[in-house]
Amino acid sequence: MSNKKAYLILLLPFFIIGTTLKSQTADLKDTNQFKNPDPISAMLDSMTAQKFLSRADFVEATRNLPFPEKSVPYEFKSFPDSVYKKNLSKLQSPISLDYNDQVKQQIEFYARKPYSISKLLGLANLYFPMFEEVLDKEGLPLEFKYLAIVESALNPVAHSWCGATGLWQFMYTTGILYDLKVTSYIDERKDPLKATYAACQYFKDMYLIYKDWLLVIAAYNCGAGNVNRAIMRAGGSKDFWEISKYLPYETRSYVPAFIAVNYVMNYAKDYNITPEPPVLSFFQVDTITVSQPVTLKQVSKTLNIPQDVLEYLNPIYTRGYIPALDATQKLRLPYNKVGTFMANADGIYKASYMETASVYTQQQNAKPNGETVIKDVEKTYIVKSGESIPVIAGRFEVTSADLMKWNHLSNYTIYPGQKLIIQTKEVVKVEKPVVKDTAIASKDSALKGKDTVATAKTDSAKTNVTLINKNDTPAAKFIYYMVQPGDTLWNIAQKYQGVTVQQLKDINKLSEGHVLLPGTKLKVQIGG
């Protein structure tokens, strides 16, 4: 048995018994017990609500691309079935692009959304070249690129009500199965390239099971467990249209929606829908390597790029911070800004360090026995006319993704007067604690002195305090090292014989991706 087949056999039970949240919602829809906005409409709304898509200052660079003028007004047309069938037959594909009443209904749904389709036609110039390159490399039908429109409307920060995230709407557990890492600072489900490779692997795994692309698409929506049950209830048939009535409600329209998107994106001109120039096209974006931690806020200031544009190009960084500590990270920029970044890299790194260190410094300077401390607080903000999610997020120095998560928003749509929860930090006053009697304090100090003998050595670079605890063996000695600007766990470990990065992490209980802030004291074992 090949390793691939063994992997699939081990993986299959997860798909069979693990019904996804999407399918649970669909089943509830059938019994009218759950009222949730149509997910396709919700994703279209989330895409069109993104303000930066119409930034005139960044669209200017794309005006030289061959986008047709909107000389003819939009007009919705319902064509005869023969026209729809003929046009679909022209879209030659390994995937069966069948036509029926369900497909017609979905075609006319999308055709009645000229503003959204215009945006999608423009955004296709940013994402489709990359999708097609990966799909071709993986040996998959190029038409799968249209599935990202059904899933997320090409919104890389799309976040569904049930937690599915990114262009390809991966749930957390499915993303982990396909090697998409999620940490406090990085969510690879939002990385356009990595998530596309993960989606392709899912398509290939499912095709090995079903040998039918429409069933693969159905499984992508509701999970293989639901598809398997539908096949059994249909007497073993593997024809999507025969088993459709046994699938969750949402999936019954999901596959027709995929076929409809293929149709409308190819025949938009029949409805007088023309592409809206994108903020940036695929060929106007370049990727560089970042060797030190950096904030998108400082990149935005130095390169004069709106921060929401940077967040859109780099959705993987969920807190606007690129944690390039023990490994380099990628930063996507407009190609004409790459040279400016390289010329100002040192200044950007330094300014980012100062920005990330400021909160830590405030916390260290706060007086726990007197006046003020930094605390996490939750505020309620009332939306004003003309405000958007990115604008409010920038005002409170939080990310759009966090703001949406705190308020359980599935898209960027907000309205004046709406109350939003904001989680931020604030300097608050505290009461001074009662000071102990001097005699008692002296006694406590003397008792502590019996337990620990400390010697300190301080210079401008670092502070080392050697501690010998009465419970330690004589050979076990520790020092405290004060982190300096530019330090990493690796170069700190190199300063002491026998010390490793993993040892530093274990002793100091540091999680993966922990940010080392200057002034932090790390415990280092130099004996034992």
Image (cartoon, helix red, strand yellow):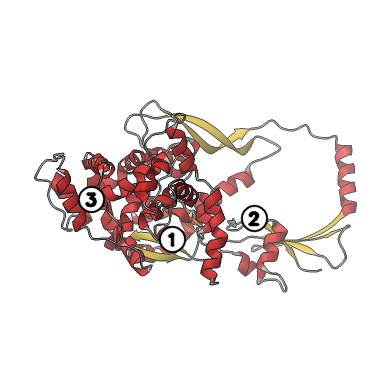
| Image quadrant where one finds the C terminus | bottom right
How many neighbours does mark 2 have within 10 angstroms: few (below 14), some (14-19), or many (20 or more)? some
User: Which circle's residue, 3 or 1, is located before the other in the chain?
Assistant: 1
Q: Nearer the viewer, mark 3 or mark 1?
A: 3
Q: CA distance from mark 1 to mark 2?
A: 34 Å
Q: Which residue is mark 3?
A: 263
Dividing the picture into quadrants, the one containing residue 213 is bottom left
Find residue 412 and report its horizontal and vertical position in percent. Answer: 37, 39
- The disc at residue 520 is 2
Disc 3 marks a residue whose amino acid type is Tyr
Q: Is residue 244 left or right of residue 493?
A: left
Q: CA distance from mark 3 to mark 2?
A: 58 Å
> Please, what secondary structure does the residue beneath circle 3 have?
helix
Residue 178 in sight from this viewpoint: yes
- Pointer 3 with pointer 2, Cβ within 8 A: no
Disc 2 marks a residue whose amino acid type is Thr
Q: Residue at x 68, y 57 (%)?
A: 521
Disc 1 marks a residue whose amino acid type is Lys
Furthest toward the left, the residue is: 71
Q: Which residue is mark 1?
A: 194
- Pointer 1 with pointer 2, Cβ within 8 A: no
Q: Nearer the viewer, mark 1 or mark 2?
A: 1
How many neighbours does mark 3 have within 10 angstroms: few (below 14), some (14-19), or many (20 or more)? many
Most foreground residue, 231 or 337: 231
Rendered view: 41 above or below 132: above
Rendered view: 416 above or below 51: above
Find residue 184 and report its horizontal and vertical position in percent. Answer: 55, 51
How many neighbours does mark 1 have within 10 angstroms: few (below 14), some (14-19), or many (20 or more)? some
Find residue 286 and report its horizontal and vertical position in percent. Answer: 34, 64
